[in-house]
Amino acid sequence: MNNLLKTSLHQTHINSKAKLVPFAGWEMPIQYSSILSECKAVRNQSGIFDVSHMGRFYISGNDASLALDKILSVNPFMIEEGQGKYNVICNQNGGIIDDAIVYKINDKKFLLIPNASNADTIHEWIIDNTKELNFNINVVTKNTAMIALQGPTSTTILNNIFSELPKIRRFRFIQTKYKDKNVIIARTGYTGENGFEIILDNDISQNFWELLLKNGATECGLGARDVLRLEAALALHGNEITEKTNPFEAQLSRFVELDRENYIVNNTLSNIKSQELSKKLIGFEIQGRKIARSHNIIKDDNNNIIGEVTSGTYSPTLNKSIGLGYISNKSLDINSEITIEIRSKNILAKIIKIPFYKRSN
Amino acid sequence: MYPENLKYSEEHEWLLKNNGIATIGITSFAVESLGDIVFIELPQTGTEITQFSTFGEVESVKAASEIYSPISGKIIEINEKLETEPELLNNSPYEDGWLIKVEISDNSEFKKLMTAKEYESFVNAGS
């Protein structure tokens, strides 16, 4: 019927009557019951998301660390075995090609998780910039599934399934077995909630998904995932971060480790860092009953255009209309009033602190 | 699949006629394509509205959409509950989720609206 890729959980989604949409070349569930109830499930209990469309690259060989040292904004030599790190991958101008998580299995083996829409670009980027090095990239995106289990009860659910699960700290992972197959469980996520991302072989993914459901998790789609990540003010590539945004203006400087001679954009990023930024990322709250959408114009109180919205949504957790965007006027700060043009109308908004939502535990 | 006693517009509004008064809402098809509705903007009672022109706006998590009136007339009542319970639109588009009641000014406008059967064919042709 169509040329869209299907994850190993596709049939499960159909059985659950999910609404499926094309996303980055894949047919993915955007929602099951409703976006709002799925958000609520993640904040109050737990939700599961099929995120198998995201890239999964094993990078291994004698020069694996060196290769990633050239490419990633973090130093792979400083990552511990069993640790994962959020990072960005920048082009020659310091623009963000993608953001990713890199997991260190050992000095000679890493797992890199880029976004679905950028996976091919990142693959080429690594190859093009590491030609002289001895390592290889094994793409396992289509052979494995990736399930995000997110929410306050997620640890309990995993402990029910794996009887002797050790404590996994934030941004750490373990390799274990399920039905005699290898499983990676990482304490990471994209919702602002406690949770895990689990990578497992395609042939056990449906069974594992159903087991999560039996243990009380709620099926959630990409619609809820987007609302939840925005409540937690986590950047989305294509919105807050693009090839035209550098990590400093995106407030990601804590994920940029400079003074590395191998890092191919070390000097570019050092230069950008030493200069004044031309724009800054802000969070805002709309005063009233409208939702700002990506590319809506932001103005100051003299009606001058000062920037653009990158994401906006209704936050069910805060019961507010919230959003992120860039502004050029650096004198505006928390509590400053701004105007957002929504469908030709000027709507009042206020800059507020991000993240909008922070979990209490 | 669409209530037989209602009339429908191409913009996916429904209308129930009762003693010169039209109750107006949006169809289950519209509600499903919008997804979770979170804000509904309606004019005040007394506002005159015109057939096929916009009188309000619904905003869902995913998208915003204008609401067009299926008939001309004066608004005599708005569904105040929607302000605090916008989910009524998703849960009950033909009953608790009604939007406005209008004093019909021109009965001849009805022939520009569709029956349930015609609306169903219209929706199926479009999707």
Image: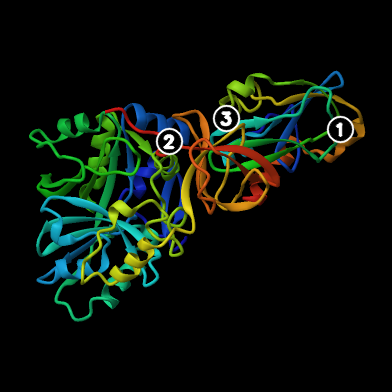
> B1 above or below A234?
above
Q: Residue A13 or A352: which is nearer the viewer?
A: A352
How far across and down, in percent of the image, does residue A244 sit?
Answer: 46, 64
Q: Quadrant of residue A270 in the image?
A: bottom left
Report whether residue A176 is seen: yes
Gap between marks 2 and 3, in whole Å?
26 Å
In x, y percent, where is residue A149?
Answer: 28, 39
Q: Quadrant of residue B62?
A: top right
Does B76 sit above or below residue A199?
Answer: above
> Which residue is disc 3 drawn over?
B90
Residue under numbered circle 2: A356
Q: Residue at x 66, y 34 (%)?
A: B27
Left or right, A151 with respect to B40, comes to left
* Chain name for mark 1: B
Query: Callout 3, which amino acid?
Result: Asn
| Residue A283 on image: x %, y % | 48, 42
Q: Depth check: B79 or A126 in front?
A: A126
Report the residue marked by disc 1. B72
User: Given contact means CB atoms under 8 Å apart, are the residues at marks 2 and 3 in contact?
Assistant: no
